[in-house]
Image: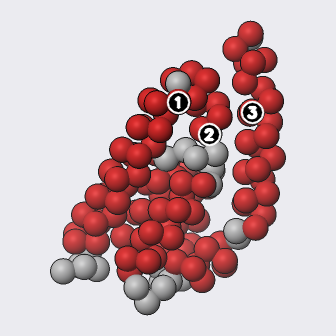
Amino acid sequence: IGKFIKIFPAFLAMLIFVSFILFLFPDEVISNYLNNSSKLISVLLASLFGSITIMPGFIAFPLSGILLNKGIPCMVLSAFTTTLMMVGILTYPIEKEYFGVKVTIIRNIISFFIALAVAIMTGIFFGEIF
């Protein structure tokens, strides 16, 4: 319980910030930005959205289904969901308390590039690129 008390202020700040981000970016706004004519820009924007947003999988994957029905390419959704699950910019304050600054930064950078690789593989598999 001592560790929880130590990270509680950062945890509370993160929850407030996440609520604000989700309020600003409903699925219609996300859909407008992710349906760009340039797939590269769409993948990068999706990666950015995924990196700065926190939501559980039981919300993220149905949201991806809605966005897929709105015409968002699978590779863009792959970038979004993979960074959403693997990259934690908003969780950085809590994560650094447990793992340290160096490990947290390295983990997030590696996770971001893995997410981009997954998006590219998804695009190839679904015929969206090449």
Q: Nearer the viewer, mark 2 or mark 1?
A: 1
Give the Cα separation between the discs numbered 2 and 1: 12 Å
**Three-letter code for the amino acid on which mark 2 is drawn:** Thr
Residue 9, image quadrant: top right
x and y, in percent, of residue 15 in the image: 76, 43
**Three-letter code for the amino acid on which mark 3 is drawn:** Ala
Residue position marked by numbered label 1 in the rendering: 101
Judged from this view, the residue extending furthest toward the front is: 102
Q: Secondary structure at mark 1?
A: helix
Rendered view: 102 above or below 16: above
Residue position marked by numbered label 2 in the rendering: 91
**Which residue occupies 70% across, 70% down?**
26
Nearest to the observer: residue 84 or residue 94? 94
Numbered tag placed on residue 10 in the rendering: 3
Q: Is residue 7 left or right of residue 117?
A: right
Judged from this view, the residue extending furthest toward the left is: 130
**Which residue occupies 58% across, 47% down?**
89
Q: Earlier in the sequence, mark 3 or mark 2?
A: 3
